[in-house]
Image: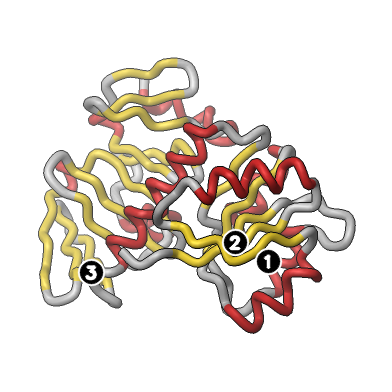
Amino acid sequence: MQKVTCIIIEDRQIDMEYLRCLVEQQDILELKGCFNNPLEANAFIQQHAPRLIFMDIDMPVMNGIDYFKKLSPQPICIFVTAFSEHAWESYELHAFDFILKPVKIERFETCIKRLKEYLELLSRSDIYESHVGKNTITIKEGTTKHIIDINDILYIEALKDYSKVVTSEKKIMTLSKLKHFMEKLPGNEFVRIHRSYAVAVQKVSKINGNDIYIQSMKLPVGKTFKSQLSLLK
């Protein structure tokens, strides 16, 4: 897979150096620069168009979210911040991920694993289409059509503008944001548990605190979606 060019925008030097260390340990990432604020990074972004930005939110010169809104075209963005209250707004902006400081190595590696999978699935085709019938969903992936029984779906994951449909046998992408994709599915059979996940109610095998288990897979429950747990009992 081709390396993903990226930059870091972070006003605290100690956080920047730590994040730089994490990024440089990932073979898929090619770090092109580190900047103290969005205005400092802007000329580089306009000239070199890095595919990925790791960006803090609360910075003195310009707020990271405000800057991301101004970018066109928008690169893949992973917000890295100490303040959880920004999570919902970053989700509304379709940021790829939102990582809280202090950044844990395991959390960072999970994010990069998702990024790899997202890019690998995108590389298969430029166009993904889906059609939801009464009991099946047909997903066109390039020239291939996948017909999936809705009852076989374990969960659905949001990946920027796409949704990844996961069954016990395969993972398939469709060009549809999770919110819109959910609107096509039977409302009583699927529940949103996180900004990035929706699960098939009948496939949930265990609920443990802030985690849901489907077969051997553990999925997180977002704070704003905890009320949905009552639908799984």
Q: Quadrant of the N terminus?
A: bottom left
Callout 2 touching callout 1 (CB < 8 Å)? yes
Residue tagged by mark 2? 53
Quarter of the image for residue 92 reads bottom right
Which one is in front, 32 or 139?
32
* Amino acid type for the residue under numbered disc 3: Arg
Marks 2/3: CA–CA distance: 23 Å
Task: For marks 2 and 1, give the one nearer the viewer.
Answer: 2
Q: Quadrant of the C terminus?
A: top left
Q: Secondary structure at mark 1?
A: helix
Q: Is residue 145 above or below residue 164?
A: below
The answer to which of marks 2 and 3 sits earlier in the sequence is: 2
Marks 2/1: CA–CA distance: 10 Å
Residue tagged by mark 3? 124
Estimate how packed mark 1 is, as few (under 14), some (14 to 19) or many (20 or more) residues with alpha carbons within 10 Å.
Answer: many
Q: How is the image coloured?
A: secondary structure
**Left or right relative to 26: residue 202:** left
The answer to which of marks 2 and 1 sits earlier in the sequence is: 2
Where is residue 55 drawn, in percent x and y?
67, 55
Q: Secondary structure at mark 2?
A: strand
Residue tagged by mark 1? 68
Q: Is residue 170 above or below residue 6?
A: above
Marks 1/3: CA–CA distance: 28 Å
Name the residue at 44% across, 49% down: 26
Callout 1 touching callout 3 (CB < 8 Å)? no
Where is residue 74 drawn, in percent x and y?
58, 72
Quarter of the image for residue 31 reads bottom right
